[in-house]
Amino acid sequence: MHPSAITGIGLTVAATAAFSVLDAGSKYVGSLLPIFMALWLRYSLQSIFTISFATSRSGTAIFKTRHWRFQLMRGVLFCVSNGCAMMSLRYLPLAEFTAIVAMTPIAMTLVAALWLKQPVSRLRWVLVFVGFAGTLIIIRPGGENFRFGTLLWPMLQLLANTAYQIVSSEMAGKERPETTQIYTSLLAFALTTLMLPWTWTGGMTPALWIGAFCMGLGSAVGHLLMLKAYEYARPATITPFLYSQIPFALCAGWFLYGHIPDQWAVIGMVTIAVGGMLSVWLSVRESR
């Protein structure tokens, strides 16, 4: 394997660890504060970290953009996806939530077939059903986890995140990655600021500030590491390693919240991960 590919893989795994820190902080802060206030705290810190890093490398030229419509759309979808994720984490443990989010590549296959009218092979349809089966194993219809809130928010998050990834792919090569990340953070920050007068509450404890710091730092570092990973390796090379976030989330859920997934949840996670990695492998084979 080429050394640059190894570097890209390493950066990807580090990014998934940062995203697990983000989700752990989101679960704690989002369970104690109003959602828009919690998101505002995240975006304010994320914007500070991201802008500081980007301007230190490229100066104010990093703010120049030629695609305001895409930037606005991406920022709105980012905010909606994060809000649904935070609501999901009120109902689901970290590892189970992460596994459901990992269905995004499979969901993009559905969008390609039903909305973009792209041809989808029978094997891809099989992988879609494999991912869906993994999700059903995790939430287990008829079990105690199968409640309206348990299903609604993760599914909405999956839809919003899929749309977000599609817009991101459309912008690939049209803007500098750092520019896109800055505007995504700032637009999400602006949207949540509009709601702040109706959602702000006092009583910020040291633990809440630590959780908010973890959200902002985890999000900024995770996204920046992913941007760097794409500079070293192709998406097809690093995408399978995005599933390393599942074991990171499992460890974080156990260490911080004492949650250990049962055997059925683990089977569901493995099913989703295998289906997703096979989907990536199939994309590589079809592109040759």
Image (cartoon, rainbow, N blue to C red):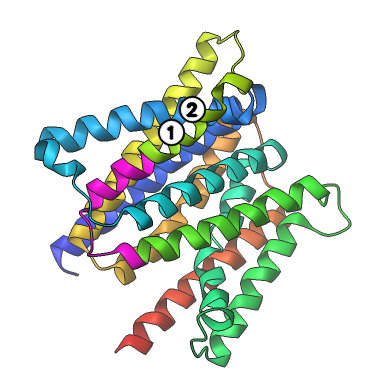
Q: Is residue 25 visible?
A: no
- Comparing 31 with 274, the one in front is 31
- Disc 2 to disc 1, C-alpha distance: 5 Å
Query: Which mark identifies residue 71?
Result: none
Looking at the picture, how far across and down is residue 225, in whole percent? Answer: 28, 46
Quadrant hosting residue 62:
top left
Looking at the picture, how far across and down is residue 35, in whole percent? Answer: 61, 31
> Residues in magenta?
170-185
Q: Is residue 101 left or right of residue 154?
A: left
- Comparing 116 with 89, the one in front is 116
Q: Is residue 142 left or right of residue 282?
A: right
Residue type pointed to by label 2: Thr
In what element is the residue under mark 1? Answer: helix
Q: Residue at x 32, y 38 (%)?
A: 221
Residue type pointed to by label 1: Ala
Quadrant hosting residue 155:
bottom right
Above-or-below relation of 234 to 256? below
Q: Residues within 10 Å of mark 1 (few under 14, many from 20)?
A: some
Q: Residue at x 65, y 31 (%)?
A: 258
* Residue labelled with disc 1: 190
Q: Is residue 251 visible?
A: yes
Looking at the picture, how far across and down is residue 45, in whole percent? Answer: 38, 26
**Which corner quadrant holds the C terminus?**
bottom left
- Comparing 202 with 127, the one in front is 202
Quadrant hosting residue 190:
top left
Q: Residue at x 50, y 62 (%)?
A: 163
* Residue labelled with disc 2: 193
